[in-house]
Amino acid sequence: MRQLSETDRDAIRIAQDPAYARWLAQITATGGCAHPIHLTGSTTTRDVTTGEILHRYDTRDEPGERLSVRCRNRRTTVCAPCSRLHAADTFHLIRAGLLGGKTVPATVRNRPRLFVTLTAPSFGPVHHTGDRCRPRRDGGTCGHGRRLGCGAIHASTDLLVGQPLCGDCYDYPAHALWHAHAGKLWDRFVIGVRRHLASSVGLAQSRFSDHARLSFARVAEYQKRAAVHVHAVVRLDGPGGPDDEPPAWGTAARLADSVHATVRRVLVCTPYSPAIGELDLCWGQQFDVRPLSSDGTGPDDDAVAAYVAKYVTKGAGETGAGLDHQVTWDDFDAATVTPHVRSLMRTCWRLGGLPEYAPLRLRAWAHTLGYRGHILTKSRAYSTTYAALRAERAGHRGTHADSLPGTVTDAHWRYTSSGHSPGAALLAASVAEELATNREVARLELAAGESERPGASFK
């Protein structure tokens, strides 16, 4: 035993515990969560009329007198099992708003719907993939003595992709402040689309909500240049939301025209700073607007939902555009990021020390390069919610916490700790791997069964 590693000794100790079977059942119930939350407490369900105890659960009967639950972290780098579940929930959340289901009527698939991509403006030339990077016949250098062009053809894995040609010429303050105001830019964009739609059909802008409602779900993604861009599903409903048909004038073409017109008009001004001045922030010149049609002529709805779900689990560290944890000035040199990202984090820290930018909390969000919005946001009427999906899953497994009719439940819970010991982490990873393998086998068997149906074919 002394020749074994600490992790192996700990795993053997856990496996030899008389309560190992129950411990394993808990870990399996969490999907092999890599960083579970440990709770202690009890739940008692009583009949309202008689006061009879119908069910009681107490963690004193559990291994270690605690109950382990999922951490629910969306980042793959933090907890792969929970991020996989979060991606699945996101897929169903987005898909329900496109095709119906989860309390959303199927008629939404015939509504005017768009898949919109909005980008950040340029803050300076950067290396990119594709054809020759930045060819220049006359050569030339910038004021800092660096070449203005690049004739190389970069592969997607080239570390130069996304890095500025000259870091001293790159407008890092504008980049950081654009990230800090990205949420406000989106809000102005949504308001602008509503106003343009109303004006285009002769409605008073204040009366738009009496005739139609704009529903959306959007996800933020970091580009190679460490700038956030936005993918969004935008849908036009009637004033009652997904249960209400839009007015006759509400067409996909008119909605697309309003999006095109609004993107170019949105403007947000930063607070005046003696060091920076006042910046006018806007969306980038490159944007994409694609209609989503139920007749199969546009992008596939399932593919759009899967695309959004894929990016919602990526943390800043995984995309190479920051870190997944807060940092201080002393951490920047040791951070495993590119020089470009490190310069952005330092810029956020410096700007965060100016009183005019204090409300932006740039130092607290330096690890995400100043971007402080949620990765995924949606309007209230777009579709279901994460909470509803989790409640439905709990009900399906028979673990729903809601009381039955005629009963009352008293619950008393307290947080005790989180995470695994070295041996427990090893065993949990094995559980997660086994569950992932079982899901893949089930998926392949389902696909094989679908292909054997009469008239079925592979795509």
Image (cartoon, helix red, strand yellow):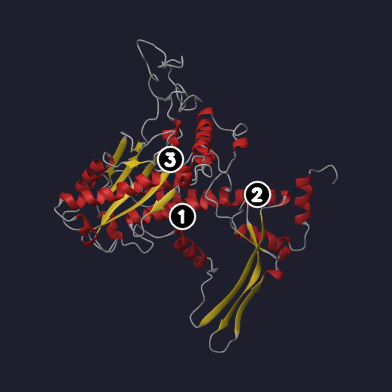
Q: Which residue is label 3 attached to?
A: 179
Q: Which residue is label 2 attached to?
A: 430
Which amino acid type is shown beneath numbered disc 3?
Answer: His
Q: Work out which quarter of the rendered image holds the C terminus and state it.
A: top left
Which residue is at 59% across, 41% downward? 327
- Identify which residue, 291 or 296, lies in the foreground: 291
Image marks 1 and 3: residues in contact by CB distance under 8 Å: no
Which residue is at 50% across, 29% downward? 340
Which amino acid type is shown beneath numbered disc 2?
Answer: Ser
User: In whole angstroms, how far apart are the C-alphas of marks 1 and 3?
Assistant: 27 Å
Q: Quadrant of residue 134?
A: top left
Q: Which residue is label 1 attached to?
A: 89
Identify the residue at the far right of this view: 2
Specify whether residue 224 is in view: no
Q: What is the secondary structure assignment of the residue under circle 1?
A: helix
- Identify which residue, 192 or 415, lies in the foreground: 192
